Structures are given as structure tokens and as C-alpha cells.
Image (cartoon, helix red, strand yellow):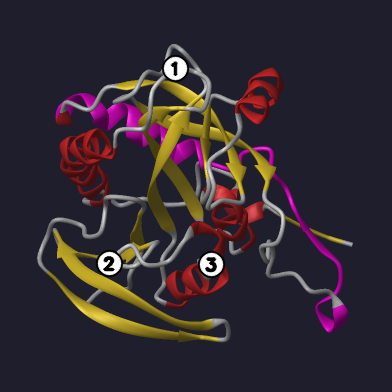
């Protein structure tokens, strides 16, 4: 079996890759991580359910550092992720798919970095291209073949959760320029960049954010929307992973600044 060069991190509603796989437990210094391993066109692909297969882990309790370390230990270099999001942008209505292009961080109590100083020295990570431009390009080029229609690029604002945001908070976030809101992309995207991994994320718009429209969130509708989109998006990811990807067309390997 080849080294595991590729990975999919599935968010809410996406708990498998849709292809035959076997389970593996990966030990890291931050804890154990359960993943699925699949073979697609002789490439080995890792699938990681961010919230667990039964969606038992809330966003603020996810062991993000263990997850990303496990993928690195398996030899992963390229990651596609999915995320259920609320929309702050009227141009991105419920049911839309968006490509996440940048982020704002409103988390409060999560371990956000692998860098602890000490003997390792002072390290910082550049965030000029947090979501790999090369992987985002592949998403847009491959989407048409899979009947995946992206509404556009989106700035993702990450909150601590598990509560949803207040109407006043959403108004503030819109003024800041956020398009969608979720609870998981930070620190995931930051940790991937610290490890030199290429990372891109697709946002599934499952509702309009608080105050954007009236009426309760329809949980049944959310489930239907996720079911409709997850298979197409997974197949798109797997199609891209049939290719030989490298890290020559992005700066993900050169993101660390040592002082």
C-alpha cells in the first residue's frame, strides 16, 4: 500500500468517504485518532470524521491537534474538508456550496497551535493563503464534471460553540466581512498550515444565520441538504485524488517563520 498522501475530513453529516475502507487507530502525543483507509486508483486515502461517526464530539471538544498529527504521521500531504455553515451573505442561500477562502477567528479556549517555544524556539506561521490556493483551483476545475455548483468564495468566521450566534453578533460579523459562520475550521486550518499540509474546505450552507431570516432552524431540512450534497462532493474529492498532486504550486510547505 502506498503512503497516505491524501485525506478527507468530514464535518457534520459526512461520516464516511462513500467507498470501501478499513479502520485504523493512530497514536499521537495528543491522543488516539480513529480513521478509515480506502484505496482509490492505487492511491491510499484517509477519511477522518471530525465529530466521530456518531457525531458525539462537539466543536469545542474536538482534539484538533491529535487529528492533524495523525494525518501527518500517516504521510498525508493534501486534505479536503467539509463544514456545515450558516450564511451571512444573501448571495449564499440555504443549500449553497461555497469554497472557503479565508477566516476570522472568534474561538476562545481551544489549543490553537503546535508551537510551544522552549527548546523548539520561537516559531510563527504565515496566513496569507490559509486555504491552499492550489487545492481550491482543483476544486473549481473539477466541480463541473460532478454537477457541483459553487456559489463563490467565502470568508468563514469561526465561533466557539456549541451555541449558535446571537443576532447582534451576526450583525457585527457581517460588518467585518464574513460570509459564513461555523465552529470547526479554526484551529484545523491553522494546524494544517503549521505542519506544512495543503488544506482546503467546502462549506455546506445549511441555514441562514440568526436574524438573516425569521423562523426556527429546520433540522430535517438540514439533514436532507447534507445528504444531497455530500455524495457529489465526496466523489469530487476522490476524483481529484486520482491525480498526482504535489506541493510545488503553493506556499504551504514554506509557511513557518523562525525567530
> What residue is shown with label 1?
213
Of residues 49 and 22, the one drawn nearer to the viewer in this rendering:
49
Secondary structure of the residue carrying tag 2 is loop
Q: Tell me where residue 188 sits by quadrant.
A: bottom right
Of residues 218 and 209, the one drawn nearer to the viewer in this rendering:
218
> What residue is shown with label 2?
53
Residue ID at (48%, 50%): 199
Question: What is the spatial separation of the Cα atoms under label 1 and label 3, in whole angstroms?
Answer: 29 Å
Q: Earlier in the sequence, mark 2 or mark 1?
A: 2
Residue ID at (69%, 64%): 113
Q: Which residues are magenta?
A: 118-145
Task: Return the x and y of residue 139 as percentages of the image width and height.
Answer: 34, 34
Question: What is the spatial separation of the Cα atoms under label 3 and label 2, in whole angstroms?
Answer: 15 Å
Residue 121 falls left or right of residue 184: right
Secondary structure of the residue carrying tag 1 is loop
Label 3: how many Cα within 10 Å (few below 14, some 14–19, many 20+): few
Task: Return the x and y of residue 96 as percentages of the image width and height.
Answer: 32, 24
Identify the residue at the far right of this view.
Answer: 259
Label 2: how many Cα within 10 Å (few below 14, some 14–19, many 20+): some
Q: Are marks 1 and 3 in contact (CB under 8 Å)?
A: no
Q: Please, is residue 77 above or below residue 212 in the view?
A: below
> What residue is shown with label 3?
61
Q: Quadrant of the N terminus?
A: bottom left
Q: Are marks 2 and 1 in contact (CB under 8 Å)?
A: no
Residue 104 falls left or right of residue 38: right
Q: Tell me where residue 151 sits by quadrant.
A: top left
Amino acid at each position: 500500500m502506498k503512503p497516505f498522501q491524501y485525506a478527507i475530513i468530514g464535518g457534520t453529516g459526512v461520516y464516511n468517504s462513500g467507498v470501501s475502507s478499513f479502520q485504523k487507530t493512530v497514536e499521537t502525543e495528543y491522543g488516539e485518532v480513529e480513521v478509515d483507509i480506502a484505496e482509490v486508483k492505487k492511491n491510499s486515502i484517509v477519511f477522518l470524521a471530525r465529530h466521530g461517526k456518531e457525531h458525539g464530539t462537539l466543536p469545542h471538544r474536538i482534539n484538533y491537534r491529535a487529528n492533524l498529527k495523525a494525518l501527518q504521521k500517516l504521510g498525508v500531504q493534501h486534505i479536503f474538508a467539509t463544514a456545515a455553515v450558516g450564511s451571512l451573505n444573501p448571495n449564499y442561500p440555504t443549500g449553497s456550496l461555497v469554497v472557503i477562502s479565508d477566516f476570522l477567528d472568534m474561538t476562545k479556549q481551544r489549543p490553537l497551535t503546535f508551537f510551544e517555544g522552549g527548546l523548539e524556539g520561537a516559531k510563527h506561521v504565515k496566513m496569507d493563503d490559509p486555504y491552499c490556493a492550489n487545492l481550491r483551483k482543483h476544486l473549481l476545475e473539477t466541480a463541473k464534471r460532478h454537477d457541483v455548483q459553487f456559489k463563490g468564495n467565502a470568508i468563514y468566521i469561526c465561533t466557539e460553540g456549541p451555541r449558535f450566534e446571537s443576532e447582534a453578533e451576526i450583525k457585527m460579523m457581517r460588518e467585518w466581512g464574513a460570509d459564513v459562520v461555523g465552529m470547526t475550521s479554526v484551529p484545523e486550518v491553522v494546524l494544517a498550515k503549521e505542519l506544512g499540509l495543503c488544506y482546503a474546505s467546502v462549506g455546506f450552507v445549511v441555514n441562514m444565520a440568526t436574524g438573516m431570516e425569521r423562523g426556527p432552524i429546520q433540522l430535517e431540512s438540514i439533514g436532507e441538504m447534507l445528504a444531497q450534497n455530500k455524495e457529489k462532493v465526496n466523489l469530487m474529492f476522490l476524483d481529484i485524488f486520482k491525480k498526482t498532486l504535489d506541493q510545488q504550486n503553493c506556499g504551504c510547505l514554506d509557511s513557518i517563520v523562525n525567530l
